Amino acid sequence: MYVQYSFFDKEIWSIYATLNTCIPLILFIIFRQTLDIQTLTLSSLIGMMRGNLLSKIIFTTFLSLLSFQNKLDIKRLFISIISIIIIHYIPYNNFIQLKIYNNKYLLFLFRITIFLWIFYFMYKIIITINS
């Protein structure tokens, strides 16, 4: 089993990984899951993962198990696995990714979006620590 993570790599990879991160986030929102720090971390890690499908599913299962609080949340596990399957079939250098990368205004907007994501993430960490 081989799974690799890349973050803060080349900018085009960051665009791809960030777009992939949106998929589990959207699914977690659709299925009314709490967007706590564990869910946000899991979504980010799922979006940055590379490897074959089976390896990613197994590794995501273990990551999901790590993020559970007191009991096994089958819904979150299912959402994580579905997210990995969807992301696996989104090609690198897809239309949206290249459109953002090749347009200076979209790229600037995307950089701001990544900054806001990191800012929101840090905010959630601070809130969690102070709770």
Image (cartoon, rainbow, N blue to C red):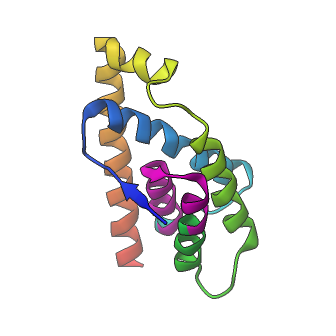
Apparent side of residue 58 relative to residue 77 in the rendered image (left or right):
left
**Can residue 113 be found in the magenta stretch?**
no
Q: Quadrant of residue 2?
A: bottom left
Apparent side of residue 98 relative to residue 11 in the rendered image (left or right):
right
Query: For the point 36% across and 55% down, which residue is it?
Result: 5
Q: Is residue 18 visible?
A: yes
What is the number of callouts on the image? 0
Query: For the point 49% across and 21% down, which residue is it?
Result: 96
Taking the view exactly as shown, the residue that stands out farthest to the front is 1
Q: Quadrant of residue 41?
A: bottom left
**Which one is nearer the viewer's eye here, 84 or 117?**
84
Position in image of residue 71 (x %, y %): 68, 86
**Which one is nearer the viewer's eye here, 103 or 32?**
103
Position in image of residue 6 (x %, y %): 32, 50
Q: Is residue 35 visible?
A: no
Position in image of residue 29 (x %, y %): 66, 50
Taking the view exactly as shown, the residue that stands out farthest to the bottom is 70
- Quadrant containing the C terminus in the rendered view: bottom left
Position in image of residue 99 (x %, y %): 43, 15
Query: For the point 39% across and 68% down, which residue is it?
Result: 127
Q: What kind of secondary structure does the magenta stretch mostly adopt?
A: helix
Query: For the point 65% across and 49% down, which residue is it?
Result: 85
For the record, the magenta segment spans 38-58
Q: Quadrant of residue 76?
A: bottom right
**Which one is nearer the viewer's eye here, 61 or 79?**
61
